[in-house]
Image (cartoon, grey):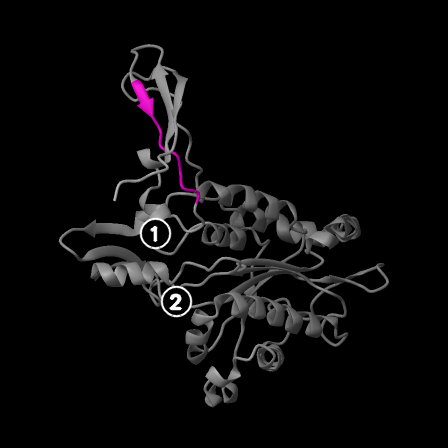
Amino acid sequence: MEAIEHCRTETLGGPVSQCTACGALAYRDHACKNRHCPTCHNDAATPWWETQRALLLPVPYFLVTFTLPEARRPVARSHQTRLSTLLFQTSARALQTLALDPQYLGGPLGMVGVLHPWTREMAYHPPSHDLVPGGALAPDGSTWLTPRYAEWLVPVHALSKLFQGTFQAALTTTGLPMHVPPQVWKKGWIPHGQAAGTGTEVLSSCAPSLYRVAITKSRLEKCEDGPVTFRVTERTSRAWTHRTRPVEECIRRFLQHVLPQGCTNVRYDGVLSPSRRPALAQRRTLLAAYPHYDQATQGSHDQDRREPPPTPEAALHCRACGGPLVFLSRLVPQKSRPP
């Protein structure tokens, strides 16, 4: 909160420029570069989006969402670092186990998992969104294996039972099962799987959530005399609506999405892990022998391709006359702040 309070103010210093045409001075404050600042890090989404887009294979993609039951969320909120790692590991293990079964696919998958810990109404909800290419390389490396069904990567009901069992077994080793209500293990955990086109649309929606918090400055509508009004999206209609809450409640909602230090919000597994990415060239060479993949994905590339959020450009011209700015000096940060 202290970093966000002093972000882009004279407290952190900043460069001073002068217009060569009119002589006016232009001052730009330094950013705090905090991980959860609503102003900073929006431009970091663009390089991540471009890197992941370059790794996409010319095959149909699937989006698999793993979520925890509502009774498990208070425990996940109190132990975010351990539970987020556990969610990534168990969901990837369940998917890989079914994919390695020759009955369903017969080869290892690659996946990019992103933690998106809030709903459209800005409530705490920690699901893992896994973007998975639709297929795998055969163990002998000679053929490309495709899913049995075009709409599903693996059976959802089998994935649900395997994910629940894997998560329960892994949770036992953390010493936290006593905080989990017993009825949680009696209900089915149903992951959601759907076709994701070429995967570019999913990357465009996940990139901003990695480098910003839920309640950004663009969502704030009004803040006066205590209550704060901000915009949210309805769960059913997906239409914009407004919520007015006291300042304390607004701050609580903001801070519940602040991840603790060391908490992982993106994870790569299988053939998309950094150590195995050099093998992607072999898969692209093999897929070149299947022209129907390129034909099937070429049309959807233009439909699914959404540009990432615009990167804010630095002020290079004078706001008064439009003349060019020249760097003049740099104000040092204030190490001692007044009480």
Q: Amino acid under label 1? A: Met
Question: Badge 1: few (under 14), some or many (20 or more) residues near its Cα, within 10 Å?
Answer: few
Which tag is nearer the camera, tag 2 or tag 1?
A: 1
Specify the quadrant that holds the C terminus: top left
Q: Identify the residue under disc 2.
A: 124
In the shown orientation, is residue 255 left or right of residue 116?
left
Residue at 22% x, 58% y is: 247
* x then y, percent, for residue 268: 63, 58
CA gap, disc 2 and disc 1: 19 Å
Residue at 54% x, 74% y is: 191
In the shown orientation, is residue 63 left or right of residue 40?
right
* x then y, percent, for residue 12: 37, 36
Q: Amino acid under label 2? A: Tyr
* x then y, percent, for residue 305: 53, 47
> Which residues lie in the magenta part?
25-33
Residue at 19% x, 51% y is: 223
In the shown orientation, is residue 286 left or right of residue 34?
right
Q: 200 or 278, which lies in front?
A: 278
* x then y, percent, for residue 65: 53, 67
Q: Is 101 drawn above or below residue 312 in the view shown?
A: below
The image quarter containing residue 82 is bottom right
Residue at 32% x, 64% y is: 234
Sooner in the amino-acid sequence: mark 2 or mark 1: 1
**Residue 278 has which mark?**
none
Q: Is residue 208 visible?
A: yes
Question: Badge 2: few (under 14), some or many (20 or more) residues near its Cα, within 10 Å?
Answer: many
Q: Main secondary structure of the magenta part?
A: loop
Q: Identify the residue under disc 1.
A: 1
